[in-house]
Image (tube, rainbow, N blue to C red):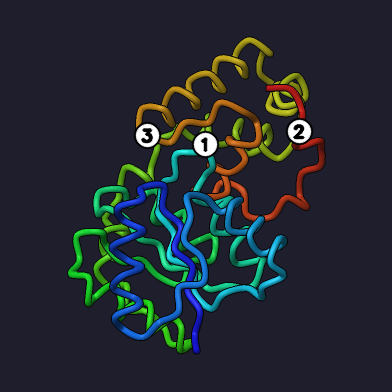
Amino acid sequence: MKRIALIDDHESVRLGLEAACIRAGRLVAFAGPSVSAYLQWRVNTGEAPVDVVVLDLSLGDGTTVTDNVTRVVHDGSSVIIHSVADRPAAVREALAAGAAGVISKSSPIDDVVSAINTVAEGLPLDNLEWASAVEGDIVFANAQLSAREREVLRLYAAGLPLKMVADRLGIAYSTAKENISRIRFKYVDVGRPAPTKVDLLMRAMEDGIIDDLSDDHGDHGGSR
């Protein structure tokens, strides 16, 4: 029998999903508020990874959707994101991290169970509605960086210290620093904050500004 895990920090959601899965003949092996709790349960019980993890898009423990999906997928389970329908940027992150699909929390419970069954059987989940929403998320796709800002971001996020970025581009250090400040402001303005250098690297990769880090060398954990 296929085994399911439900991860949501709202107990009422977990209980509703668990009841629906049980009615549909699915075994809910775990239900809890976080990915860490699920992985700890695996360690404590010695249970194998479940077939499908139904994961809330945004948990209240400070984790990111990318981290949560990545941890579950690397542990050996497929992931369905169970989410509200107004966060295409976060949905895009989840799919990029390896989620098998997305089902809206506003969907009828039978549709949610059907999605779980589909992924449990190793079949692709129809994500046309979500794909359309993600592709239509112009704000996510374009933070409207200038050509100079994109070049500064490419070098800085790839690991170069800001002083070296300035030297390579033939601009003053203060100008390069101002560019980074503007870049961070623009990402905050479109709901994609990048307070650290690692965050800037993620944004640059998401937006296609950096495709291959092998062209630029440096310490990605450098100064902010």
Question: Residue at (26%, 56%) from the top-left corner?
Answer: 136
Question: Residue at (68%, 32%) from the top-left corner?
Answer: 156
- Quick one: SS at disc 1? loop
In the rendering, at what x and y percent does residue 66 appear?
54, 52
Q: Tell me the residue that label 3 is attached to.
A: 191
In the rendering, at what x and y percent does residue 102 appear?
36, 66
| Label pair 1/2, CB-CB below 8 angstroms | no
- Quick one: SS at disc 3? loop
Determine the CA span between mark 3 and mark 2: 23 Å
Determine the CA span between mark 1 and mark 3: 17 Å
Looking at the rendered structure, the kind of residue marked 1 is Gly
The front one of 201 and 119 is 119
The quadrant in which residue 42 appears is bottom right
**Mark 1 against mark 3, which lies toward the viewer?**
1
- Quick one: label 3, few (<14), some, or many (20+) residues within 10 Å? few
The quadrant in which residue 161 appears is top right
Looking at the rendered structure, the kind of residue marked 2 is Gly
9 over 69 or under it: above or below: above
Question: Residue at (41%, 47%) from the top-left corner?
Answer: 9
4 over 186 or under it: above or below: below
Q: Tell me the residue that label 2 is attached to.
A: 221
The front one of 207 and 28 is 28
Disc number placed over residue 62 in the picture, else none: 1
Q: Residue furthest right?
A: 218
Looking at the rendered structure, the kind of residue marked 3 is Gly
* Direction from residue 209 to residue 112 in the image, left or right: left
